[in-house]
Image (cartoon, rainbow, N blue to C red):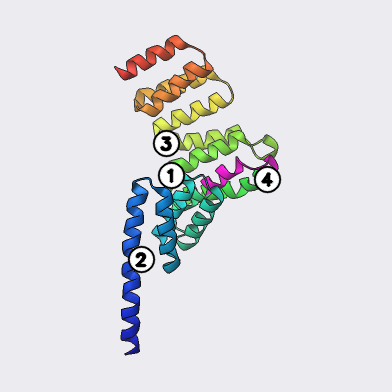
Amino acid sequence: MKKLLLFFLFVPICIWSQSNFEKAEKLYHAKKYDEAQIIFEGVLKSKPSDIKTIEYLGEIAAHQKSWVKGAEYFKKLKELKPTEADYFYKYGGCLAMRAMEVSRLKALGMVGEMKESFEKAIILDPKHLPARWALIEIYLQLPGIFGGCESKAILYSNQLAQLSPVDGYLSRGRIDVYFKRYTAAEKNFIKAHEIGKSKTTFQKLYNLYLNNLKDTKKAKELKQKFEA
């Protein structure tokens, strides 16, 4: 009798959680993040270890640029599901964005955990492209005394090239732009655009012509050809 009573008490809670989860999910996909957040937080109180609910709350925090809160959610997801590469990547991503808001000294203290998170994502998913992009940025922007190193950035760029030629050329072009080697960057971005022919590859080459090489003629010709 006691078990039966518990069953009838428990079932309505499950139904409530599920219906509210679905409602919050619809709001999230409609980009009504504030409304979705309130409902997801209610669902989480009744199901504190629900992975999908925590993931949605982490994504909402990221949309709201609440990097500390986002990091907390993705840290919990790492613990609940330590085999999921994206959770490590997104945790590292929140830390990286937070590092841009704090003092340089505090940001440098966060680098080790960022790198560790991105490296773990690659271990869990050897084909993880965004984690390699993130590591390239870290090694480019870190001062040499704190571990910044072009050769390490190139190492991850070479890995990208093996997985995706477009990303390989784009990342090498990004490294060249960082060091103001604009002629070399142009060659890499042209190769990337020849392969990808996408909005992303166009934009990288277009921005190089417009902002770095100051060649409005080439920028105009590229735009006309891409939009034709």
Disc 3: which residue: 162
Q: Which mark is residue 18?
A: none
Q: Note whether 66 is above or below 176 in the view shown.
A: below
Residues packed near mark 2 inside 10 Å, few (<14), some (14 to 19) or many (20 plus): many
Of labels 3 and 1, earlier in sequence is: 1
Residue 168 painted magenta: no
Q: Position of residue 216 (x, y in %)?
A: 46, 11
Residue 51, by quadrant, is bottom left
Q: Which residues are magenta?
A: 92-106
Q: The disc labelled 4 sits on which kind of residue? A: Lys
Which residue appears at 40% of the width and 63% of the height?
43
Q: Earlier in the sequence, mark 3 or mark 4?
A: 4
User: Looking at the rendering, in which quadrant would you find the C terminus?
Assistant: top left
On screen, residue 38 above or below 92: below
Res 84 seen here: no
Sequence-earlier tag: 1 or 2: 2
Residue type marked 3: Gln
1 or 2: mark nearer the eye:
2
- Residue at numbered disc 2: 17
Q: In the structure shown, which secondary structural element does the residue marked by tag 3 occupy?
A: helix
**Proximity of marks 3 and 1: CB atoms separated by less than 8 Å:** no
Q: CA distance from mark 4 to mark 2?
A: 40 Å
Q: On the image, numbered disc 4 is attached to which residue?
A: 106
Residue located at (38% from left, 15% from top): 222
What is the chief secondary structure element of the magenta stretch? helix
* Residue for badge 1: 128
Foreground: disc 2 or disc 3: 2
Q: Earlier in the sequence, mark 4 or mark 2?
A: 2
How many labels sit on residues?
4
Q: How many angstroms separate mark 4 from mark 1 (CA)?
A: 28 Å
Which of the two labelled residues, at mark 2 and mark 3, occupies the earlier sequence position?
A: 2
